Amino acid sequence: MTLQVKKLAELDVRGKKVFIRADLNVPQDEAGNITEDTRIRASVPTLRYCLDHGAAVMVTSHLGRPSEGKVGPADTLAPVAVRLGQLLGQPVRLIADWVDGGFTVAPGEVVLLENCRCNVGEKKDDEALSRKMAALCDIYVNDAFGTAHRAEATTHGIARFAPTACAGMLMSAEIDALSRALGNPKRPLVAIVGGAKVSSKLTILKSLAEKVDQLIVGGGIANTFLLASGKRIGASLAEPDLVKEAHTVIDLMRTRGAEVPLPEDVVVADEVSALARANTVAVDAVGANDRILDIGPKSAAHLAEIVARAGTIVWNGPVGVFEHAQFAEGTKTLATAIARSPAFSIAGGGDTLAAIAKFGIGNDVGYISTGGGAFLEFLEGKTLPAIAALEARFGG
């Protein structure tokens, strides 16, 4: 599964008008101040490459959930323009009504085009809007992997009509990492899928069950698998109506000589809180009122051994309620094992990124994906419209 797309780093952009779709959707406080700028900083390498190589640069992004046709006070990219200018060390003009052109950009200059989701037709991938935007540029660059699972005018339509369409630095890195992890991985391929519900990750589990050598499940998902294996889980979060689906995943793995390793010991409490008293018990000793909130030390050590032998690791989701110290050890042990493993590792999803930050292993993970929904849909084996549009333009 090698994805073939043109890459920005391979193109001559000097003197060209470059339209970049970035993901600058950053959180803000009530006063409009940016509270976390990771996405803006992640967009800088692509912008810097274009500016340093003499391109005239236009960049746009969505922000929040605006109504099409108007830019409200909470919708404007004005604070982003200020922060981008600080990071780039040069002024960044904000262009309000830009779809029909009428503005100029000089080589070496960058302008920020106002919130693209405020344009009528953006979310519906309107062809007329896409053609207008494509006419603004010589080269279209998609650098917004986080929106790659959406077919919108700035992520999909414009790629069809721009003279050249390519992937930016961030998008290229995502494509390369995901292709390396799932396309032709070094074996054994180990996937870790945690989270509250099987239902939200069912298609991912089934897709991975056809590819991986070990499928580690955690959180509420593991509880449903424990039910499927005949274990009592007390008052733990689970989905009894999906036991049959869990059986299907286990059987899929078994027919390939692979397995779903389940906990032999667990950490239980009678409530989820910072003050809850945690007890470690054998999985066969879970009481009627117990809630399983983490894996026990024996289980964590076993999973760490599996990770240590892996050739490739895909991680999405914690194995316990790691936000509370007494239920964090399982996820911490697994995170440490991933950090120490020589395997290529890729991690994605909001809770996973929070765990990586909490346990300080960011520099030891092979690749950390920036796209939550897009990362999950890629794991599901779905075609991501924005990437498909770039693939279609690979030869021309």
Image (cartoon, rainbow, N blue to C red):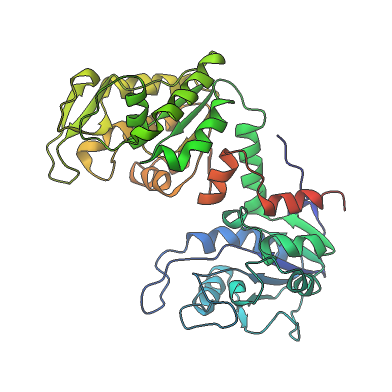
Residue furthest bottom in the image:
102
Where, by quadrant of the figure, is residue 197 drawn? top left
Q: Is residue 381 above or below residue 249?
A: below
Where, by quadrant of the figure, is residue 232 drawn? top left
Which of the pair 177/207 is nearer the observer?
Answer: 207
Where, by quadrant of the figure, is residue 296 drawn? top left
Residue 90 is left or right of residue 314, and the answer is: right
Q: Residue at (46%, 21%) from the top-left corner?
A: 250
Q: Is residue 235 above or below residue 141?
A: above
Classify the position of the N terminus by image quarter: top right
Q: Is residue 7 visible?
A: no
Q: Is residue 271 above or below residue 290?
A: below
Q: Position of residue 371 (x, y in %)?
A: 54, 51
Residue 210 is left or right of residue 304, and the answer is: right
Q: Position of residue 171 (x, y in %)?
A: 64, 52
Q: Position of residue 221 (x, y in %)?
A: 37, 34
Q: Position of residue 271 (x, y in %)?
A: 16, 42
Residue 12 is left or right of residue 154, and the answer is: right
Q: Is residue 123 above or below residue 68?
A: above
Q: Residue at (48%, 19%) from the top-left corner?
A: 309
